Image (cartoon, rainbow, N blue to C red):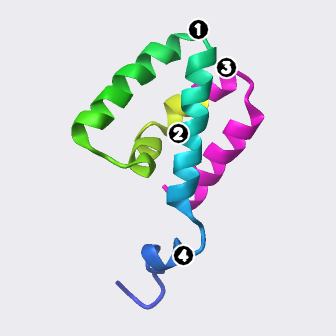
Amino acid sequence: MNDQTPDRYITFLGLDCDAKADRMMEMLHAQMAASESRWVRYFEQKLAEKARMATDNLHFVGSQINSLFSFFEELEDEEGLALLWHLEHNCC
């Protein structure tokens, strides 16, 4: 790494990415419970894979960012979209 390249782990300090990813997962579960969207079945499958693979919430959010955006856009969930944007641009 050259002197101009920031250390990504240092740049994550103070962002509390894990807690924000945990919040995103809470929001996802709440929206899934209240929705009949086609995305619900998709996320049920992906969450089962997440459990089998024992990945953390930040990894899940990062790997599903586009699908999460589509789901929250469909639901017009501005709070969820804002949190996703923040996670994508600052944590993933």
Residue count near mark 1 (Cα–Cα under 10 Å), binned few <14, some 14–19, many ≥20:
few
Q: Amino acid at mark 4?
A: Leu
C-alpha gap between disc 4 and disc 1: 38 Å
What's the distance in space between the residues labelled 4 and 2, CA to CA?
21 Å
Q: State which region is magenta.
A: 71-92
Q: Is residue 82 above or below residue 8?
A: above
- Mark toward the start of the polypeptide (4 vs 2): 4
How many marks overall? 4
Q: Which residue is mark 3?
A: 74
Q: Is residue 30 above or below residue 55?
A: above
- Looking at the image, do the residues carrying marks 4 and 3 touch, with CB atoms under 8 Å apart? no
Foreground disc of the pair 3, 1: 1
Looking at the rendered structure, the secondary structure element under dot 1 is loop
Going by the numbered disc 3, the residue's amino acid type is: Glu
**Which residue does the numbered mark 1 point to in the structure image?**
36
Relative to 72, residue 22 above or below: below
